[in-house]
Image: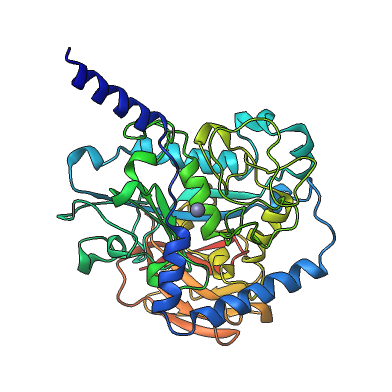
Amino acid sequence: MSRILLSLIMSLAVLVANAQRICGFADYRQQIIHNTPGLADKITSIEAFTRRLQATRPQPSSNSVTASSVITIPVVVHVIYNSSIQNLSDAQVQSQIDVLNRDYRRQNADTANTPSYFQPFAADCGFHFVLAKVDPHGYATRGIVRKHTDVQQFNINDAIKFSSSNGDDAWDADSYFNIWVGDLTGGVLGYASVVGGPKANDGVVISYKAFGTMGTAAAPFNEGRTGTHETGHWLNLIHTWGDADCGDDKVDDTPPQQAAEYGCPSGIVISCTDGPNGEMYTNYMDFTNDACMNIFTLGQRERMRALFEPEGVRYPMLSSGALAATALDDTAGISGEPEAVALVSVYPNPAADLVTVSMTDQNAIGATIELYNQVGQRVISQKISQLTFQINIGTLNRGIYYLKINDGKSKNVTKLVKF
Ligand SMILES: [Zn+2]
């Protein structure tokens, strides 16, 4: 082997070994604020809301997430491929969802790698991610969209998020967490939208080389942590150094940090005024390698979950219909008997066209009443503005349907027969 070839191979090996995490969030944030009138003010008001909420809360504790307070996030993954290798398998997509579910419940195997002095701050963030089961038109889906593109590489200008620019349009961001996977320029592993930004741009973009734990995912970014990191931004987290020299990440229990850490540091690294334990370089919001990050803090959890409080930006997601098919599977058609629903009376039933729906609970006002067919497709969706009203099923095929109030809480389903 010639000496030149040998040294070329060796410098390539060094390059690969030194592959560094590049997240496009900070640059993207500047760009979208510049291009979106009013966004800076909106971010300021979201920040004020989050601060107000934090101020009125008791100090968070590690056990404050219970099974009933887990927040379920319906996900759609847009696989945008130019070459066939980028058309990732369903299994690879699921491997990324699995990582999110471990990391956001602190069920990841490497929690033991969190230094002992940071363990008291470690949080079960209480988020659960599920691929969507119902698409925006009410049809059954597996939550994965595959689309060929002529674009060889995308950058952080959001072209990947629009069909008009050879990407794929977002699904309604109030109901779905949009993830786009494709090839990105400049070694960028991923970037996330800004909370409060335009709905059509809402979601995260991840390189196919850093997505999930198998297939095209390449070391040292093949443990799904790019997904965990970018999802953190989508949930309003900022890099631990606040994208400035000893900057502010708006979270009190992450130590100040001068700048990003790369690779896989060890021991105590002091910068700014963060002694005696130094930087929390194992935080998912730092730039370390996948294998070297393993913690969100209680403060980060509170910041993320604030978005889902009433008046929070992501509150509407709690009443998403994206997983309705599951709810129907849970309750409908098993016993063959209609479910008892305290809120609703439905008559006549069976019916040919007009059905009167009546309820007594004022909380129903403002919710949506939805009718699903037997394969879980939503065929009617109607806003509830009074306690007794009619729906017209005259145009539907004969058969069995399921009526459901979508208020984010009720799981009760009433069987309705069209004849
Ligand atoms: Zn980032």
Residue lying farthest bottom?
Answer: 386
How many dots with numbers?
0
Residue lying farthest right?
Answer: 58
The residue lying at 76 percent from left, 66 percent from top is 54
Regarding residue 347, the answer to whether it shows in the image is: yes
203 over 212 or under it: above or below: below
214 over 240 or under it: above or below: above
Examine the image and state in which quarter residue 216 appears: top left
In-front residue for pair 14/54: 14
Q: What's the image's color scheme?
A: rainbow
Residue lying farthest left?
Answer: 150
In-front residue for pair 89/268: 268
Residue 223 location in percent, x, y? 47, 34
The residue lying at 31 percent from left, 22 percent from top is 10
Q: Is residue 200 left or right of residue 74?
A: left
Residue 24 location in percent, x, y? 42, 56
Give the quarter of the figure containing the C terminus: bottom left
Regarding residue 329, the answer to whether it shows in the image is: no
Residue 155 location in percent, x, y? 30, 58
The residue lying at 48 percent from left, 55 percent from top is 74
Q: Is residue 44 left or right of residue 189?
A: right
Q: Is residue 247 left or right of residue 147?
A: right
The residue lying at 72 percent from left, 33 percent from top is 115
Give the quarter of the figure containing the N terminus: top left
In-front residue for pair 229/67: 229
Residue 68 location in percent, x, y? 70, 52
Residue lying farthest front?
Answer: 3
